[in-house]
Image (cartoon, rainbow, N blue to C red):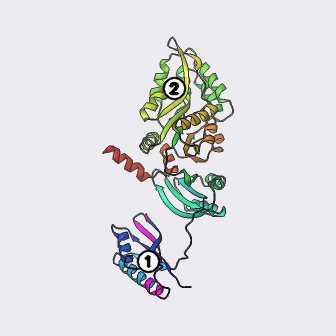
Amino acid sequence: MIDRTLLITVSGLDAPGLTSAIFEALAPSPVVVIDMEQLVVRGHLTLAIAVEIDPSVGDSEAPTVLDSVRKDVRLAASARNMEVTTRPVALLEADHSPEKFQVIVMGSPLHPECISIVTSTIAKHGGNLDRIHRVADYPVTAIRLEGSGVAPSALRRPLAEVSARCQVDISVQDVALEARGQYLVVLDVDSTLIQDEVVDLLGDLAGVGSQVSEITQAAMNGDLDFAQSLEARVKLLAGSPATLLEQVGKMVTLTPGARTLCRTLNRLGYRIVLVSGGFTNVIEPIAKDLGVYAFRANTLEISDGKITGKLVGPIIDREGKRQALIDFATQLNIPKRRTIAIGDGANDIDMISEAGLGVAFNAKLALRESADTTVNVPYLDSVLYLLGITRDEIVRSDRERAN
């Protein structure tokens, strides 16, 4: 059988005009482009082009055409100090497999052994990698692997085991979780968006800190029902001046990367909502400062300038957080598959499980076991990389804002 296809691979130091020069060399020949991919890593370019001889050219003329293509491309490449390899390539149909996935691996540092284990695990479960590229190199290294042949759901559990074994963060997503359409990001507040537990800070100021913290820890670990634990902690605050809430508002500290996360998502058109088991009195100023779409939290009852030890309205507990995600998604007409929930404690489990992508951020064990992916570095903006948003996009967005 006569070869009528050719795979051309060009590599070398990148410079403006290289790609156009290669295609200019191909232009006079009776060939059509059937596939191509270009990648630049640290200034080194690799360009792969698959061409097929035009059907109007007979088989007897095919070898001459391919020889001419090889010669013209090599001359164009050598003039720019590029290397070229060529070989026949099987004319396969384009991959239309419905099973497509993307895996994002993030670590600080990221070792070759880890990449080997991840890629072999994907292959073991029937996945074929089509593309690998860097998402970020600061403050963590993150790479995205795109492929087909296996459903994302079949990869999540095996790669979760790899994540724990290699001590890296791994996110598995359906490629259909894609760039088109609006997303909803639901963020827990205490120990996620901020570094503090607000009720613990209130307890410290009210002189009952140790008692409150002990209940908080048990609730976050899943050892106590959250609603009952919250009521018990709030009861300990009874009689304290309401001015403590203002004091706590000045004490809370945003998690590193929180402002970058919200700023970037806002610019990209994501809708961010804060859903918290904390208190509206403290969360509302934070929500305004970060420009989020909305928030839902608990409200402390205040009477005669004092905290009564009771709550006003329904308690935002595990079920309340899950329902908040559903409510906001419905309100904004955003499908479940494009919802993202981020939290750290056991009271986030239902919300995380409901979301299209559930992220456990420096989380307790109970939540890590329920999440789609974990983030174990202390930078909240690292979540952006798991969403496929690159460091370059973040920097470019900040530059545009500055201008």
Q: Find numbered disc 2 in the image and state the secondary structure of the residue it sits on.
A: helix
Residue 257 counted in the magenta span: no
Residue 247 percent location from the top left of the image: 46, 23
Mark 1 is on which residue type? Val
Identify the image quadrant of the N terminus: bottom right
Seen from the viewer's position, the closer of residues 246 and 87 is: 87
User: Looking at the picture, does residue 41 appear above or below residue 279?
Assistant: below
- List the residue tagged with mark 2: 280
Residue at left 66%, top 61%? 125
Q: Is residue 271 left or right of residue 21?
A: right
Residue 108 is labelled as none
Residue 371 percent location from the top left of the image: 62, 45
- List the residue tagged with mark 1: 31
Q: Is residue 79 left or right of residue 298?
A: left
Please report the bounds of the magenta region as a residue range. 39-65
Residue 365 percent location from the top left of the image: 65, 42
Q: Residues within 10 Å of mark 2 (few under 14, many from 20)?
A: some
Count of picture labels = 2
As drawn, the residue found furthest toward the left would be: 403
Residue 145 percent location from the top left of the image: 54, 59
Residue 44 counted in the magenta span: yes
Q: Is residue 191 visible?
A: no
As drawn, the residue found furthest toward the bottom would be: 60
User: Looking at the picture, does residue 272 appear above or below residue 58?
Assistant: above
